[in-house]
Amino acid sequence: MEAMEDDSLDVKDDHNHNYCASGSGKARSYLSSRLSDVTPVPQPVPGGGEAGSRRGTQWSGSSSSTTTTTGGSKFMDSDSGSESSEVSETDCAALPPAVEGKFTLDSTSKFLLNAMAVEDYRKNHWPNLEKAIDRLLIQNPTDHISVSYAQIYSYIYKCVCQQHSELLYNDLTSKITSHLQHVSTRLQASTPEDFIETFNVALTQYTASLQCIVPVFMYLNKFYIESKLNRDLRDDLMKLFADHVAEKHVNTLMPLLIEAYSMPFKVQPSTMASVVNGLYSLQPDWAQLAPALFSGFIPQINPPAVESLLSDYAARDQKLQMELSMNGFPRGDQSRKRASEDS
């Protein structure tokens, strides 16, 4: 009996620590040595089917820590409760057909899941986003439209997480391009007397809409437009207005602006300032078409003053004052001016 205990103490544990030399390890070593005499009985695995084929045969009547290899699949001992990730090339070649077909099934499943995700985007996400964009584009600056920005942001977040960023960006730009084409058509039908005011309304309404659209598309802007396209969403949407509206009508708009600038208060000063500043922000090069017009609203358009041209500047100012006086803008009673402190 003592000899048996001595022999059991000489047992060495393997790299998985399945056998120990402690007191409890004696019984485990003894049971492990008798496993070869036990007939393996397959146990049903919950889930059945392919999972059962992959897990192979489990040994009945033993809860010891053993490594079992059946059908080319390796399993760790029951203490660890995990499958071994080390599978040799021979094991892969010996995989049963059910396991070999798993890779093809995974590829097909990924394709089907992706197709389902695109279908879900087309049926659920984009229609809801399109309705919200429509409402934001047609609103007036003074109108209040009830829109759930949290819900819109949630749709956008899901679209980006499901790898639909490019699809969403293309749909957004196409939607806004279609809207701007309608705006351009309405401008074309406007009369010359109302053209400046109509253009100002279109530009003001569009920029007000972007103040709502750009923030809710912030996630798309950060993780797709800025990171992959190296651009900014607002700049892209303003460029759409420049390409599809302003550029098509700038040759009609500029002569009307020059005429209105030469006749004070023919157009409201606030409207003139809004249109001129808007054109300059869309395309700074347009300032070269009418430098005198743009310099009246935007500083540093003209080149810096030169000392040798001071007399010309003075003559230009006198001419301007004379024109204003002839158009009904007198200088007023100069005798009412406050006397200087030096006098």
Image: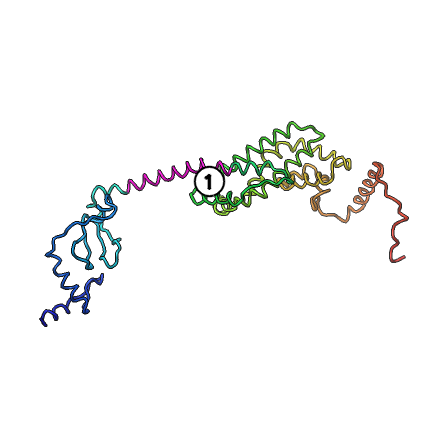
User: On the rendered image, what quadrant is the N terminus found in?
Assistant: bottom left
Residue 84 place in picture, x, y as percent? 25, 54
Residue 86 placement, left or right of 186: left
246 relative to 54, above or below: above
Residue situated furthest bottom in the rendering? 2
Q: Residue at x 74, y 38 (%)?
A: 268
Q: Which residue is mark 1?
A: 166
17 relative to 115, above or below: below
Q: Residue at x 11, y 53 (%)?
A: 39
Q: Choose top left, top right, bottom left or bottom right for residue 6.
A: bottom left
Residue 290 placement, left or right of 86: right
Q: Residue at x 72, y 30 (%)?
A: 193
User: In this figure, what is the number of numbered marks?
Assistant: 1
Task: Give neighbour class at mark 1: few <14, some 14-19, many 20+ (Cα, 10 Å).
Answer: some
Residue 284 part of the magenta segment? no
Q: Choose top left, top right, bottom left or bottom right for residue 289.
A: top right
- Residue 145 visible to the viewer: yes
- Residue 90 visible to the viewer: no
- Amino acid of disc 1: Glu
139 relative to 308, above or below: above
Residue 149 place in picture, x, y as percent? 54, 44
Residue 279 place in picture, x, y as percent? 65, 39
Residue 129 placement, left or right of 330: left
Which portion, as a residue range, is magenta? 103-129
Residue 124 part of the magenta segment? yes
